[in-house]
Amino acid sequence: MRHKFLRSFLVVALLASNAFAQQPARTINSAPDAERLRAHVTYLASDKLDGRRTGTVGAEAAAQYIAEEFKRLGLRPVVRQSNAPSQGKEGKSGATFSAYAQAFPYVADVELGEGNAMSFSLRASDTAAGAKPASLDLRLREDWMPLGFSGNGRVDKAPVVFVGYGIKAGELNHDDYAGGDVTNRVAAAFAGTPDGDNPHGKFALYGDLRLKAAAARGAGAKAFVIIATEDIFKEDKLARLAYDNAGGDAGLPVIVVSRQFAAQASGRSLTELREFEKEMRAGAAAPRFTPDATLSIAVNVMRVERPAHNVVGILEGSDPQLKNEAIIIGAHYDHLGRGGQGSLAARAGEIHHGADDNASGTAALLELARLFVEERGKLRRSVIFIAFGGEEEGLLGSNFYVNNPAMPLAQTVAMVNMDMIGRLKEDRLLIGGTGTAPEWKAWIARANADPDIRMVVAMNGAEGKTANANGSGVEVPAVVGANGQMMATTSLRGRFALTLNEDGFGPSDHSSFYAKKIPVLFFFTGTHEDYHKPSDTAEKINYEGTTRVVSFVREIVRDVQASERRPTYALARSQSAGRATGFRVYLGTVPNYAETTDGMKLDAVRDDSPAAKAGLRAGDVIVKLAGRDVRNVYDYTSALAEMKAGEEYDVDVMRDGQRLMMKLTPAARK
Ligand SMILES: [Zn+2]
């Protein structure tokens, strides 16, 4: 190695017992190859794969491609070949796929089942008045539609209560349900908020329909009716049945009705309805009244499951002991298909190519697999390569993996995630999770040091807070002059201009692993104007830059390999406390967003948070909060929306089959 002399000089002079001294010498290996990366990205982001939306043929073709690559490289499949289903009509490629693929449940779509019906009746007092019809059958698709997250069920002739926007916001002292009872009735509300469409208005967070439906359910309503925004019903986005893939059904029927029907039912013209909405917004009209009418509603929405897969390949370590530990390198391969949920495109229907997001990370994953296979003899720990599905739908694939791992999580020493690493610009690289193990910063600093002057020194108390697991201090990059004297720099400037973020939680798959107390790192070259749009295409990728990110990640993985000790899990400083909900109260919980109807599971609880002080723990399932039954994350969020900082609330959780009751005092979010 080029800097053996300087390194050993410093090891002798400065380091008594540094882990680094025990590292095996490194040899020059093959370099990451820009043309290989280009070939992977070009295929994955091609029109043929149709945007790789989870549950589609395009995503399955991508998974198949990755599985074939894993096989070609000689990675071990999760399913031993002998256990793989015998070769059927799909033949050899089908067998390869099923060996490397890890299927997870995925609701891709919703469809209308049989028996959706709705009718409206005026009560006797009104019909006696004459002109109006006594009852009205409403036409599905023309006058009303269930929403994708609606619960199934029926209500018969339930009185209707109009509840303004249907918002309950404790911290804003706003309650559209105040002063009246919706128990066993149908709550009806306008879509939107008193702010109109202002995304920065104080009510912006409360316009979420899931939240409104949860508020209606919490108030005792039997069904929740939303009045369309568009005059032409079929142009209203709520009138198109779609599933948001987020947390199960609402637990009560939730439907949208046309403005024509809303006008008719309230005895107004369309213009008068618009005027009424304006007056209500200005505070001039009462946001709450009970029309003298009843609704009967039957909803039957069917969930359509489609295949969804992670692709997992294992490269076994060579150390008889350490091979039972694994480092995971991951990247999600799914994207947004032709738009819809998550898309920022002006209109739906175009292929979202997802070259940077995340064909780039997937290509890097394949390239790292190739490179590590070449040096497999030097790998002491096993490396598990995972291409995740379902990331864009809410980290579904990684969430499934951590609950169904190929190697027990207790033996999983670290997870390195690459998501959008193809747009390197001005050498800017963002690394998340740097606070999740005390070892990371030194390894990052070294990997980032200029290769021509790279070495490691120990400086006790550097950065004033962290210390190595072995107590020898923090490793920082150093510059050494021609005379061998250290000129010293602790700057992280080197190969990349790094931005480090300590938090192990973030908007990609590493979050799922950090929630299981595994040290993580997340690599990202930054967002751009093509993010989540059809224009995120293969020719815009900086392939040379991506090879440099791949080299960087390889260095980090080599450091984990070289270290006798596994990285030490640490609770990282959060840079987004409470942002997950956006409300001003902060509990310090990390919810699990999987499908659920029997409570909200906590993936993690932040140390020293109000939730931790209340006695909540990771794995607890919240079933009741602040007097509200909690079936899923939306009920939970809805309860949160009504809570105030500094006040004490009851919280009930299920833990090991027992129901526990605790007291929780939310803090104000800073
Ligand atoms: Zn994305």
Image (spheres, rainbow, N blue to C red):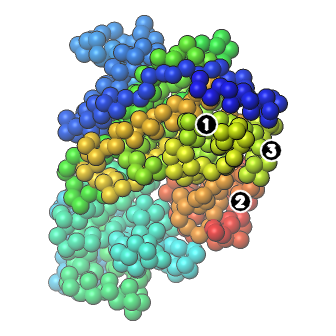
Q: Residues within 10 Å of mark 2 (few under 14, many from 20)?
A: many
Q: Say which label, 2 or 3, has the lower sequence index.
A: 3
How far is disc 2 from disc 3 in space, using C-alphas? 35 Å
Q: Identify the element where label 2 is drawn.
A: helix
Can you say which quadrant of the picture contains the N terminus? top right
- 240 vs 576, left or right, is left
How far from the left and from the top, in percent, is residue 156? 35, 61
- Closer mark to the observer between disc 1 and disc 3: 1
Residue for badge 3: 460
Residue 422, can we see it? yes
How far from the left and from the top, in percent, is residue 261? 22, 73
Residue name at image x 53 percent, y 73 percent: 169
Q: Residues within 10 Å of mark 3 (few under 14, many from 20)?
A: some
Q: Nearer the viewer, residue 104 or 213?
A: 104
**Up-down: is 31 above or below 83?**
below
Determine contact: label 1, label 3, CB under 8 Å.
no
Q: Amino acid at mark 2?
A: Pro
Can you say which quadrant of the picture contains the C terminus? bottom right
- Closer mark to the observer between disc 1 and disc 2: 1
How far from the left and from the top, in percent, is residue 622? 62, 51
- Residue 454, numbered circle: 1
